[in-house]
Image: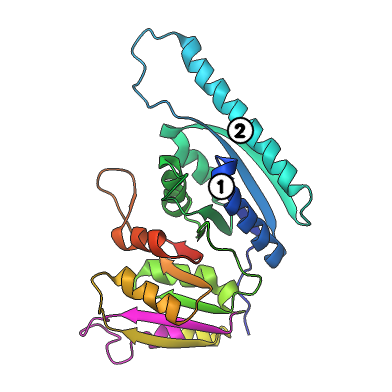
Amino acid sequence: MEVAMPFKTITTIICNMDADRHALEAATALARREEGHLDVICLGLDRTQPGFYYAGTNAMALQDNLQQAQTESREIESQVTEFLRVQEISWVTNPLTAQMAGLTPQLAHFLRFSDVVVLPRPYGPGRSHEHEEILEAALFSGHVPVLVVPDTADVPQNIERVVVAWNESAEALGAVRSALPILQKADVVDITIIDPPQHGPDRSDPGGSLCQMLVRHGVRAEVSVLAKTMPRVSDVLCRQLRDKDADLLVMGAYGHSRFRESILGGATRHMLELADIPVLMSH
């Protein structure tokens, strides 16, 4: 059996220790589970919008914002270090100061060598615009898989039941390939297909080719073909997660570039808002 490349470099990004502590705990648990190394980016943000200052503004005001962000980054690093020094894993902290306008390229540069990035759910209480921006930077610019962990969920020591949301897309296949180290250890992997196209190349055997690929990798895979009996695909998928008592959802991340560099598509956003288990995504 060919063993997929394990998660050896695991990264998380902390921009508020109170809001992001759960992601740090999840990333630590994953690093311990995979016997990997944890990189923690301690992010101090200058939230000044470009163009906010008019010509002739006192340069000291600009400098103050930068120094405040640097202080914030050092404070986060101190809190993260205090948490990690008692953990029996390999880790390092990376203090980073960025302006919101330049956040994506800076993060993409740091993240490109990671095997997976562990982040909190970007929506909900305690979350702000930068959490969404960080997620999109990892997925669309860093091109690295992201494990999103809701505050109410943990990364189980043994991920036994996995649901793969399959729709024939390149993004979904990329997510499956990224998840192989986890899928190979799972007891059962359910390839879930909702309303497959009646005229597609795989109409006679939906999910069959993916199932065959996974079985050859030693994955215990099965296929579920479901009708779209609820208004949104995400609602059907959430019901399937409950029915299968899943520990993890694997899915492609869909984005479209219209107003910003990248915006998470509706189906992806709905799943991140609704899923109460970790979601591994790739684009």
**Residue 117 falls in image quadrant:** bottom right
Range shown magenta: 186-211
Disc 2 on helix, strand or loop? helix
Left or right position of 22 against 229? right
**Where does residue 180 sit, x and y in percent of width and height?**
55, 74
**Where does residue 109 sit, x and y in percent of width and height?**
53, 44
**Where does residue 133 sit, x and y in percent of width and height?**
42, 44
Residue beneath the point at 57% across and 21% down: 67
Q: Closest to the observer: 258 or 69? A: 69
Label 1 crowd bin: few (<14), some (14–19), many (20+), radius 10 Å? many
Kind of residue at disc 2 = Ser
Q: Label 2: which residue?
A: 73
Q: Label 1: which residue?
A: 20
Q: Name the outermost residue toward the bottom.
A: 204
Can residue 54 be seen?
yes
Residue 96 covered by magenta stretch: no
The N terminus is located in which quarter? bottom right
Residue 54, compared with residue 259, is above or below; it is above
| Residue 197: assigned label | none
Dot 2 or dot 1: first in sequence order is: 1
Give the distance between the C-alpha atoms of the residues marked 2 and 1, in whole angstroms.
Answer: 14 Å
Label 2 crowd bin: few (<14), some (14–19), many (20+), radius 10 Å? many
**Where does residue 262 sit, x and y in percent of width and height?**
34, 48
